[in-house]
Amino acid sequence: MDRFRMLEVFVRVAELRSFTRAAEALDLPRASITQTVQALESRLQCTLLHRTTRQVTLTPEGAAFYERAARILHDLDDAETDVGAARGAPRGRLRVDVAAAAGRHVIAPALPDFFARYPEIHLELGSSDRPVELLIEGVDCVIRGGLVHDDNLVARKLAEIPVATCAAPGYLSRHGVPSAATALGGHRFVNFFSAKTGRTFDNEFERGGEVVSLAGESCIACNDADTFVAATVAGLGLAQLPLTAYVRGLVDAGALRVVLGDWHVPALPIYALWPRRRDRSARLHAFVDWVAAVYAAQAPATRP
């Protein structure tokens, strides 16, 4: 059996903590994954993985072997990447996870241009708003909004999206147009909460030296950007929405109105994040450079 194939299968099982998920990721029968790991353990004469009906974990020997095996595979991948880059053609598989709304409204519509430039890159594009464990899930890069707090990742700011307080015309006709962030009694908010921590974000306003931060009375909080916008369009309250091209289109069409325009709202930074061990990947940097240009084209005035 191909020793590199054995390493690839073992590393994917270790990272995904599942024989079934590894089989899906590698497009192989689950029985082949099991047999490959068993053959590797027989070759090494030790148990690499603890298997239960609920999870797969590394033994001490498996953890040590995983570190060496992953490094070998990454070095091989880097070598292939360098050869591809030398001939001017990044190639190979790239796994990227993006926020669902960004995938739908920003990235997917622009992908024909990406593949015209890089026809030898095979992109696996996941769309979610949940936190992603890049190393465990074998993801090469994620694109997320908000601040970054992980020293194990390389972060590149792609854009800063302006944020504005918005509401549907129907909501404003029922509750009135707010005159100031300090006079929001009787108004409701559509709030946003973190998929990672569950914490609801406060609504923040600034004018001159005056700062107002409040959760606000609310009947709904969302953790998906499209649902957040849809709830606002439905007239459920005021909301602080990133002014993406999609949201600006809703404002232009009259489905939303910007209010409290003289009160500043902090912008939303957008980052590409990837593990430091992947920093040499030519296909990764080709994708990040491309997606940075996509964001810059959507909001040229907010280029970082």
Image (cartoon, grey):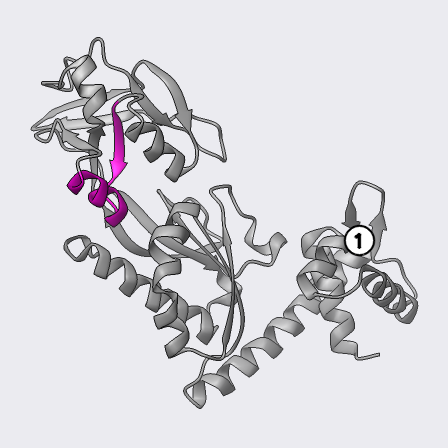
Q: In this view, does 292 lie to the left or right of 26?
A: left
Residue 194: in magenta span: no
Q: In which quarter of the image is the C terminus?
A: bottom left
The residue tagged 1 is: 60
In this view, the residue in front, 179 or 10, is: 179
- Of 255 and 236, the residue lying toward us: 255
Q: Please tell me in which quadrant of the rendered image residue 76 appears.
A: bottom right
State the residue at coordinates (81%, 52%): 59
Rendering coords of residue 105 (x, y %): 34, 51
Vertical placement of residue 232 versus 96, above or below: above
Left or right, residue 303 beside residue 112:
left
Please report the bounds of the magenta region as a residue range: 238-253
Displayed quadrant of residue 181: top left
Q: Position of residue 175 (x, y in %)?
A: 19, 13
Residue 4: x and y in percent read 74, 76
Q: Which residue is drawn at 78% across and 55% down?
A: 19
Q: In which quarter of the image is the N terminus?
A: bottom right
